[in-house]
Amino acid sequence: MSTAPAGTPAGAPARARARRAWHLYRAWRNLPATALAVGWARRHGARITVGEDLLVECAGMPPRTYGRGGTTVGNAWLHGGLGGPRRRRHEARHADQYALLGTGPFLALYGLNALLTRNDPRLNLFERWAGLADGGYAPGSAPRSPTRSTTRSTTRSTTSSSTGPSRTAPSRT
């Protein structure tokens, strides 16, 4: 029986084994969607790397081949160049959501949630669970539909005071 190295908390090896088991299960559960997404990414010239957590990063994709700043499909994260550990953590949580719910139910529920929240990621339950800050959705920065954001910015510019930046309406949580 081996012991943990000095300074390693008790139970750390067991947590590492459990995390590895989850990553393997998640990769297996998400395999069909991941295979399709990786095929799409290869077709569009992505640089593909597989992390220790078995999340497949498909970087360098051309604009309009993925949604928003990036899209996770199964265990594949498609993006143009928004890498980094925080964004990766956010997208890995979406891969967890795919694995927990299954591809069909996840996509249906995500889409329904997007409709109900007018596609505002700050209000979307799945984006909130994945971590708004890690996903780059800082308060007040989430895009709405182009007509709404245009209307809002026009209204702000005509009603803001010269003493400071205007504030957005509080979010509905």
Image: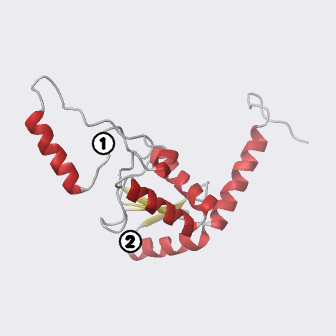
Residue 42: horizontal and vertical position, in percent?
A: 44, 74
The tag on residue 45 is 2
Amino acid marked by disc 1: Ser
Q: Is residue 145 above or below residue 164?
A: below
Alpha carbons under labels 1 and 2: distance apart: 30 Å
Crowding around mark 2 (Cα neighbors within 10 Å: few <14, some 14 to 19, many 20+) is: few
Amino acid marked by disc 2: Gly
Q: Which residue is at the front of the view, 24 or 6?
A: 24
Q: Which residue is at the front of the view, 130 or 42?
A: 130
Task: Report helix, strand or loop for mark 2.
Answer: loop
Q: Residue at x 38, y 41 (%)?
A: 172
Horizontal side of 111 relative to 17 (left or right) equals left
Horizontal side of 88 relative to 29 (left or right) equals left
Q: Residue at x 35, y 37 (%)?
A: 139
Q: Residue at x 66, y 56 (%)?
A: 23
Residue 107: horizontal and vertical position, in percent?
A: 50, 65
Task: Report helix, strand or loop for mark 1.
Answer: loop
**Which residue is the site of mark 1?**
141
